[in-house]
Amino acid sequence: MRIFYISMILIISGYVGYRSMQPTDIEIEKSKLDKASNKKWAKNKTIVALPDKVDSRSKIPASYTEDEEKILRGEKLLRFKTAAEYESFLRQAHAEGLKINGSIKNLRVVRVVFDRSTRQSDFLARFNDVELVVENDTVETPEPVMQTSAVGFKSDPLNFLGVKSTEGWGKGVTVAVVDSGIVDHRAIQSKVKHFDLIGGADGITSHHGTAVASLIAGDSNHIKGVSPAVSLLDFRALSDDGQGNAFTVSSAIVMAADQGAQIINLSLGTQSDNPILFDAVNYALDKGVILVAAVGNEGAGKVSYPAAYEGVVGVGAIDALENYQGFSNRGPEVDIVAPGVEVKAASFNESIIYFSGTSAAAPIVSGALAYKKSVNPEMSNEELIDFVKQSSNDAGPPGSDNYYGEGILNVGRMEASTAGVYKDIAASGFFLEPVIDRNSYKLTFSAENRGNTKLASVVLSFSYPDFEKTYTFYDVEASQTVYDYIEVPADSRLLNGDYELLLKAKTDGGEEILNNNVKAARIRLNPQSSAKQ
């Protein structure tokens, strides 16, 4: 990417001290002029009739079963070096009365409880091939703490994603949902095959798994998923209160891969890097499965696992004004962001909810991957994932970053990019960050070539009351972001939302899309947060 700098150093007067600030303390408040339109990531690349449902719940092999009420305290997960030692341990453990709460044959993993009558060290000393002993870490779906300024999507997000019709999307693709279970709902007309790993599936009172499934495969007047024609595999691995553990989730991932899932959605996470979960993820990746996971809702500077693992598509959340949400975990493992504030989704008892969090964003990305896989089955997984990233809209700092990842998902752009040569220059937006040693802020503004051909020139105009500047960039490649910045003193009224910023981008020769050439916004520092309603 060619980088163009013009620095305007504004004189600072009468300002003493500097407050420590996180990027989440800054919010760019878009005006009504800034409407969602066709989108793509700006990476500096150095790529009707109801179908039959499977109503009966599939019987789980004994090696995968567990009771939901099992107490995790005192449990251990054992991994063996060889299949022979794994089998030998199971035989001897049963003979000696050791409590076995489950096993995963393909990972050579056993879930055990050592009680007071069985000394762990003495028992394991007889098994030389015990490769690893780890805790059975908790996996969960934490509720997000919403920013009061967040703007919800309310209705389906397809218009925001640039989608006009999803008829037939996802056909021939199998998507597994590892979650709290999917219940029958009029919005989910896809074929669903159920696997209950923890029991209680006949009386599910959690909306979570059903909501996730509807954002992938919803097909009703009120709820639209991205790929309504997919086949769904439902793995109930979390309780109704969103609690699970590394063993059960790992079991579900392995089972999903063995059952032929091509995409696995994981709207869950843990802060613990559990080796067994890592093994399960790599087992699925080795079998050619795409894994999509929520980055987590803790508002932390650390992405949750399994989203943090290499090869997993980590998904963060934005609101309807494209603002990165403070609850969405951040880090270099964030790959892409998608709608995650008050997205209409299905729930139990045929009800409808507004679903928020990275848990909502992840299935939207899973649905987009399923769509692309259904129309281009010859693409490799790497090519497919890279294409979705390349077809997203650059946001935040120009290029890949720890907040938006590669950008905002744009399914409409995924469609358009293969429909012949077209031009589209877009005003990407603004990003504000502190310059600590200067007691000021750096305000970056950018434009992105969202077409699929080189643009000879791009003119970027940035203005606010009593200030206007025009910048020209030449030979802007497809998917390239061009940008510049000004430096703003810390006492400027610009930082209090008093002035509207206006950004315009244009190119010569005409464009197919014109409604993304202008962005207007106001800066807000220190947006307040509140508990989720």
Image: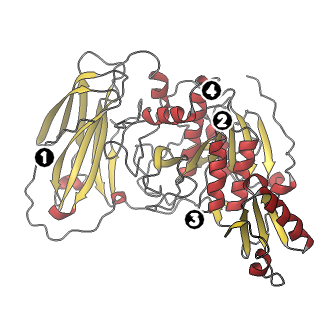
Q: Secondary structure at mark 1?
A: loop
Q: How far separated are the C-alphas under marks 3 and 1?
A: 43 Å
Whether 247 is drawn above or below 363: the answer is below
Graded by Cα atoms within 10 Å as few (under 14), some (14 to 19) or many (20 or more), the crowding at tag 2 reads many
Q: Closer to the observer: label 3 or label 1?
A: 3
Q: Residue at x 40, y 53 (%)?
A: 149
Q: Is residue 15 left or right of residue 36?
A: left
User: Residue 141: which quarter of the image?
Assistant: bottom right
Q: Amino acid at mark 2?
A: Ala
Q: Amino acid at mark 3?
A: Ser
Of the residues under marks 3 and 2, which one precedes in the sequence?
2
Instruction: Name the residue carrying label 4.
Output: 374
Q: Closer to the observer: label 2 or label 1?
A: 1
Tell me the quarter of the image containing the C terminus.
bottom right
Of the residues under marks 2 and 4, which one precedes in the sequence?
2
Q: Is residue 470 left or right of residue 521?
A: left
Residue lying farthest to the right in this orientation = 95
Instruction: Name the residue carrying label 3.
Output: 272
Q: How far separated are the C-alphas under marks 2 and 1?
A: 48 Å
Residue lying farthest to the bottom in this orientation = 116
User: Residue 457: horizontal and vertical position, in percent?
Assistant: 21, 24
Q: Is residue 442 left or right of residue 10?
A: right
Instruction: Name the residue carrying label 2.
Output: 217
User: Residue 34: which quarter of the image?
Assistant: top left
Q: Closer to the observer: label 2 or label 4?
A: 4
User: Residue 349: horizontal and vertical position, in percent?
Assistant: 75, 47
Graded by Cα atoms within 10 Å as few (under 14), some (14 to 19) or many (20 or more), the crowding at tag 1 reads few
Graded by Cα atoms within 10 Å as few (under 14), some (14 to 19) or many (20 or more), the crowding at tag 3 reads some
Instruction: Name the residue carrying label 1.
Output: 7
**Residue 198 visible in the shown view:** no
Q: Amino acid at mark 1?
A: Ser
